[in-house]
Image (cartoon, rainbow, N blue to C red):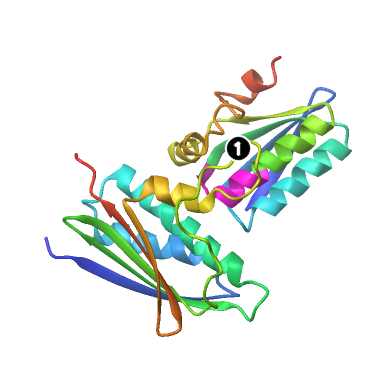
Amino acid sequence: MTEERKNLVFSSPPDDVDAVHAFLETVWEANPEVGEFDRMAFETALIELASNVIQHASGDSGVTCVLTVSAGDDGLTASLADTADAGGIVLMNREMPEELAESGRGIALIQALVDDLRYERRDERNVWTITRGRSAD
Amino acid sequence: MEFRTDPVGTDIAVISGEGRLNMVSGPLLRDVVKRAIDDGRPRVVVDLSRVAFMDSSGLGALIGALKSTREAQGDLRIVAPSTQVSMVLKLSNVDTILPPYTTAEEAYRD
């Protein structure tokens, strides 16, 4: 199959993660071959990422994000570029906090759900990329 | 997301939500549970059967609510989590402190 690529531009406020859920609905409709578990894992990781970006940007003047999701034979990739200042989120190798912690799980969850999580600062944008390979059927 | 509270017996509240439990609805859940505790119902059952999706903010709210009920000598139990919610609970190692019950009746039995 050819690779499907879809884009969403959203700004918070007023948009929130519901915009990302609604957008993913259209991705799944266009890519019915993506399995149930892959959808669930990828959607959970992407929502964690978008929530983190929105949360860390709140208090400033808000944030605008450009989200690109592509689905192909190799799996699913999302790239989220945001206008927030650099360095708001500490990314790598976050351990899952203890059971009764009320926060700090977002990045650890993303790491558990995708094969690759990357960050780069590019043209005054934070660019986050997550990739999840296709599960065996 | 809206929550409904159904009082059961003298000290139990069954709280049901429909939609997604996330950074938007999490604070609402904390408020609803606090109201139940303030009304003298610290034994809280959260029916998740119509919660299709939960993220770590929603999970944080659930754990905050659990701690509030315990501070009031009660407890919080969850019922019928979806596959996605169960996945988040398991990956977060929270399934040990919030084991799922099948029905509300089963959850508040003991």
Depicted A27 relative to depicted A64: above or below: above
- Secondary element type, mark 1: loop
| Closer to the camera in the image, B81 or B72 | B72
Please identify the quarter of the rendering in which residue B78 is found.
top right
Residue at 16% in and 56% down? A73
Chain label for disc 1: A
Question: Residue A57: within the magenta?
Answer: no
Residue B46 in the image: state x and y as whole percent: 65, 35
Farthest-out residue, front: A93
Number of numbered discs: 1
Residue named by callout 1? A98
Residue at 49% in and 56% down? A48
Residue at 88% in and 32% down? B40
Looking at the picture, which amino acid does disc 1 mark? Glu
| Closer to the camera in the image, B14 or A48 | A48
Q: Which residues are magenta?
A: B51-61
Depicted A54 relative to depicted B12: above or below: below
Image quadrant in which the N terminus of chain A is located: bottom left
